[in-house]
Amino acid sequence: MTRQELTDIIFAKKSVLCVGLDSELSKIPAHVRAGRSVEDAIFEFNKAIIDATLPYTVAYKPNLAFYEAKGLAGMSALYRTVSYIRSLKEPVFIIADAKRADIGNTSRLYASAFFGDGISTPDFDAVTIAPYMGVDSVSPFLGFEGRWAVLLALTSNPGANDFQMIESADGQLFEKVLQQSKTWGNESNLMYVVGATRAEMLKKIRSIVPEHFLLIPGVGAQGGDMNEVLKNGWNKSGGLLINASRSIIFASTEDDFALAAKTEAERMQKEMEAFINQNM
Amino acid sequence: MTRQELTDIIFAKKSVLCVGLDSELSKIPAHVRAGRSVEDAIFEFNKAIIDATLPYTVAYKPNLAFYEAKGLAGMSALYRTVSYIRSLKEPVFIIADAKRADIGNTSRLYASAFFGDGISTPDFDAVTIAPYMGVDSVSPFLGFEGRWAVLLALTSNPGANDFQMIESADGQLFEKVLQQSKTWGNESNLMYVVGATRAEMLKKIRSIVPEHFLLIPGVGAQGGDMNEVLKNGWNKSGGLLINASRSIIFASTEDDFALAAKTEAERMQKEMEAFINQNM
């Protein structure tokens, strides 16, 4: 999906909501699991969540760990989920939250694992990438029309303090990652992960990458403040994908899980709409 | 596999050789691919390489990218490869070169994806981990008896210069990664990736982590000097796993590929043996 297409969806839906499909089997409602294989249970859960949340959602973001943890059954459920989303009439952005990166010839293979044809490998729009290995580990993801690398800049977890905040002559490490990497790609093939629990850092980040899209995890269960994120992160293209995972998909673990997911997604979208109406 | 068991294999085989199973389908000899499914072709190739190289090898290291690039067929070939190695009478160390890491609850899922029961998920001994997200992204891999995290410290690719060498008050970033992370685990559950193209850095690294095992990629096709690595990296437990991938598994792409792999593995092992005999 191109930058313009993504922006169009954001303005049409008045939403920057990304739903994280962190579909951990043990948290899937018992009645969805009952009588189903692992693969079918995960897929049917995802399908119900997608059907319920699609009107409010511009992106879905399955985290690979939740699927790999269930082996081939989990991976097959993931592939079927991506195919299902692609089969819908509505264009939606799909991010593989995989945090990959390796030396150049290996990153090229990872790119083909995620930027596939939808048959032998799934056709994600984007994949999250870890920056530690530098330019040749990231560049192979940047050569595909309408596909994106989403590079970790500042994450929302406690361990973000260990290395990302280290001070050097060029500022903190996450600033250096932004400054350096923006020369490798552009605002049409490169986004950044910025943890919402650090919304106060968004101004600083926006001064380095004013035009790029930012994927913001940590709103919802992780406690980030959505209005702060919108205020400090929004740009004329939208420029934001705000992710919520557990707070939506596990809003209820009873029979009404899909309705509860819809209600929470709609609640978030309405908050986004109020902001977007004032800022478009 | 415990540290002591790994050391025992090293001294028994007089080898620190790790064979990287970067089994890219398009490089697999035509006669192995002929008439076989993708899954079977990759598996049969790996099996032939393993059978040929096992006497000289203490560890196998499939890189996940090469399998994920072939979708479910590739992943299934990977799982079968790990099961095949486990079915052999000889204990061998198996590393998932996956370069994973995510926030704590997600890294826990990745750990279960790689430290499995060998049925629904493969039972690797170790998985490579990217350090950018810090302590809670690494710790979940450290809580399994006889299983290991192999943390990226200094890699062998050109992009290693982008961030890993950044100077801060505590030295370069890779030094900070070593200093900080060694307090999270110990020399029985944590190893480090150190690129062999920088053998001159090994002394510096050994002064920070004298006891830990180091996984050294970049010998062979990437051009590192093995004797320099042995001289500067060896410790009383062995302390090294020196990886070669393409230079062994694709030593020939003709009918004699397995024999050529054996010859190259044996050549490397003999060089290691000469050093080990003088240093045990």
Image (cartoon, coloured by chain):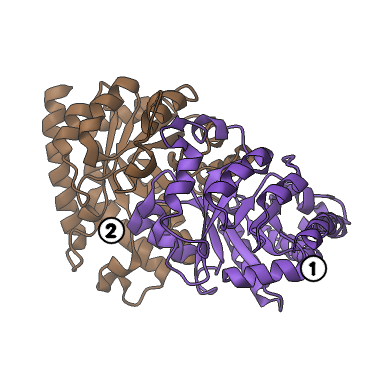
Chain colours: A purple, B brown
Task: Tell me the amino acid under the disc marked 1.
Answer: Pro
Q: Which residue shows up at 26% across the image and 73% down it?
A: B30
Q: Is residue B3 left or right of residue A66?
A: left
Q: Is residue A101 above or below residue B28?
A: above
How far from the left and from the top, in percent, is residue B226?
Answer: 17, 38
Q: Is residue A140 visible?
A: yes
The N terminus of chain B: image quadrant: top left
How far from the left and from the top, in percent, is residue B100?
Answer: 49, 45
Task: Tell me the amino acid under the disc marked 2.
Answer: Ala
How far from the left and from the top, in percent, is residue B208?
Answer: 34, 22
Q: Which residue shows up at 87% across the image and 59% down it?
A: A259
- Dots 1 and 2: beta carbons under 8 Å? no
Image quadrant in which you'd find residue B170: top left
Q: Which labelled disc corresponds to residue A55?
A: 1
Q: Which labelled disc corresponds to residue B48?
A: 2
Q: Which residue shows up at 45% across the image and 47% down it?
A: A179
Camera-nearest residue between B218 and A183: A183
Q: Is residue A261 above or below residue A170?
A: below
Q: Is residue A80 visible?
A: no
